[in-house]
Image (cartoon, helix red, strand yellow):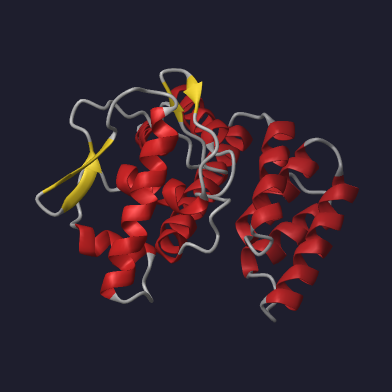
Amino acid sequence: MHVLGPLSVTVNGRLVRGWGTRPRSLLAYLVIHRADLPPREVVTEALWPRADLPAARNNIQVAVYGARRALREAVDRQVIVFERGVYRLAADVMVSIDLDAFEGHVQAGQRFADAARVEAAIAELEAAVALYRGDFLADARSEDWAVLRREQLRLAYLDALDRLSSLYLETGQYSVCALLCRQILERDPCREDAHRRLVRSYARQGQPHLALLQFRTCIDILARELRVAPGPATARLHERIRRHEPV
């Protein structure tokens, strides 16, 4: 299952097609919470928070039926079962999900970076960034239960890019560092540390004019979005570049 970006599900190498939004959301919820085994009432409250009890139970039965029917096209077995008031995946169903791999690579990258194992950290963080095809369940924006998780994962992705770009700056790979900083700023233009890192990358590549332009961009964005001026670290960096000092 891929949940970073639009949801996609493959069973035994076969892409599952032809199912509606609610069956897809239900399966995603059950997979994400497969270790918790939430009771039916918790699932219905998450997916249909404004429905009364009879309507919510009917909704989940319809969604389960739709999910089972779609999955049956790919595998001739019951994937979703109901036991003791709990909807869950069948015990013999093996699940691989990009979210687990993403979080594993991020954690490994942080450990390696903290241990000064730069090459290993870069490899792990690159793997994590490659898995992030888009925001969590990007095609299910109306799902309230996914909002907090989506924001948490978006921040984890930006932090991975941030740490990775720092490692590339440390190892003298300035063009790659600049590319990653631009990716960060596309998603969060107010990250002042990413602006500084991009300024340094330009300066160290012998492009002080681009560095100064980036500083001006930083000033404008912070003023427009946050109504603040750049911090002292950014101001000092600007002065050093303006005086053609090493940064």
Residue projecting furthest to the top:
13
Quadrant of the drawing holding the N terminus: top left
Asked whether 159 or 145 is in front, the reply is: 145
- Drawn side of residue 89 relative to residue 201, left or right: left
Q: Position of residue 217 (x, y in %)?
A: 81, 62
Point 76% across, 38% down: residue: 204
- Drawn side of residue 107 relative to residue 89, left or right: right
Point 70% across, 81% down: residue: 227
- Residue 102 appears in the figure: no
Count every numbered label the image shows and give the total: 0
Asked whether 234 or 112 is in front, the reply is: 112
Asked whether 220 or 66 is in front, the reply is: 66
Residue projecting furthest to the right:
209
Quarter holding residue 179: top right
Point 71% across, 34% down: residue: 174
Residue projecting furthest to the left:
84
Q: Position of residue 167 (x, y in %)?
A: 55, 35
Quarter holding residue 41: bottom left
- Drawn side of residue 107 relative to residue 167, left or right: left
Q: Position of residue 150 (x, y in %)?
A: 47, 56
> Where is 84 relative to 144, above or below?
above
> Where is 63 relative to 172, above or below?
below
Q: Position of residue 235 (x, y in %)?
A: 71, 66
- Residue 224 appears in the figure: yes
- Drawn side of residue 171 relative to residue 74, left or right: right
> Where is 81 relative to 186, above or below?
above
Asked whether 123 or 239 is in front, the reply is: 123
Point 22% across, 48% down: residue: 87
